[in-house]
Image (spheres, rainbow, N blue to C red):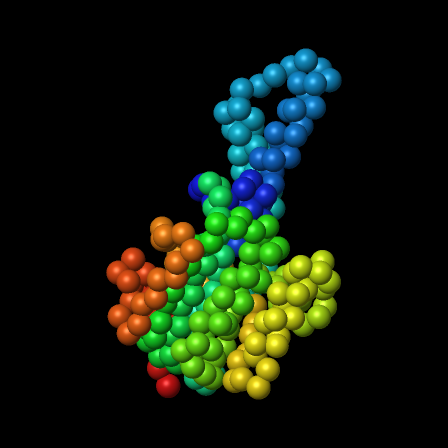
Amino acid sequence: MGEDRSCADWLCEVLENGKDEEICEFLITIWFLWKERNNHLFNNQKLEEWEVVERAQNYLEEFRRVQGPAPPSIRHSQTYKWERPEEGLKANVDACILKEGGTRFGLVVRNGDGGFVMAAVSRTRIKWRPEMAEPQAFLWGLKLVKQHNLFPVMMETDCQSLMFKLQGKEKINLEIDTVCEEIRAGVEGEEVKWRFWGREGNTVAHQLARVLCHWEETEIWFDRPPCFIVPVLISDCAGLTHE
């Protein structure tokens, strides 16, 4: 799962981003594990882990055989590949909570052709809770965008709950609401828009937020991207249509 993700984070990622067949296999395996756990507790019978998984796979294969070909799925009808902004620039931000303590932020800014403009990473000693880390990352990215006058800009995050907070649809606590209010005040009068966009369209910022960097420092790249994000930048641009 990686050092920076909890089991809950991993489960959410599987359910949000996994393919339908992967999720089906995952849920059936969990179901069989739960059944065998109860069987062990109440009937004093125990199977090895590999036997449980094998039974789950056999059940799934039989289920697929009986059901026949699955109908086209609409669950993933919307894809979240990186898209060019309607005008100006696009900035993607992400946060990474570190197991050893602290939080890292990542930001990448690109133009309408997917061309690299700026990237940045920062690391703080504060280990924010997940619901606080994403607003802090967004505010950090917004301040950098304003500092370098990168307007007009569409700012994207893969944290949907943050968008609800910024739109005033969800109230959590005073601390988080205060950060969201600072974000809203920070874009007042500026050419800034924001939106939720799924993890697949936020991969560069996601990767930047996992880069090793010094405590309490922000590292910035202009014009030429750091080599470790070049493959992802190229991959994002490969899906763009040329007008």
Could you tell me if residue 93 is visible in this image?
A: yes
Q: Residue furthest front?
A: 216
Q: Is residue 192 above or below residue 233?
A: below
Residue 77 location, quadrant: bottom right
168 on left or right of 13: right
Of residues 128 and 14, the one nearer the viewer is 128
Residue at 67%, 59% in the rendered image = 175
Query: Image quarter for residue 186?
Result: bottom right
Determine the residue positioned at 68% across, 64% down. Answer: 177
Q: Nearer the viewer, residue 118 or 37?
A: 118
- Residue at 32% from the left image edge and 61% from the top image edge: 229
Q: Position of residue 220 (x, y in %)?
A: 34, 66
Q: Residue at x 39, y 58 (%)?
A: 217
Residue 62 in the image: state x and y as whole percent: 57, 37
Percent coordinates x, y for residue 237 in the rendering: 34, 71
Can residue 18 be seen from the camera position used here?
no
Position of 15 relative to 164 (above/below): above
Residue reaching furthest to the top: 44
Left or right of 153 in this view: 133? right
Residue 113 position, x and y percent, is 35, 79
Q: What quarter of the picture does the C terminus occupy? A: bottom left
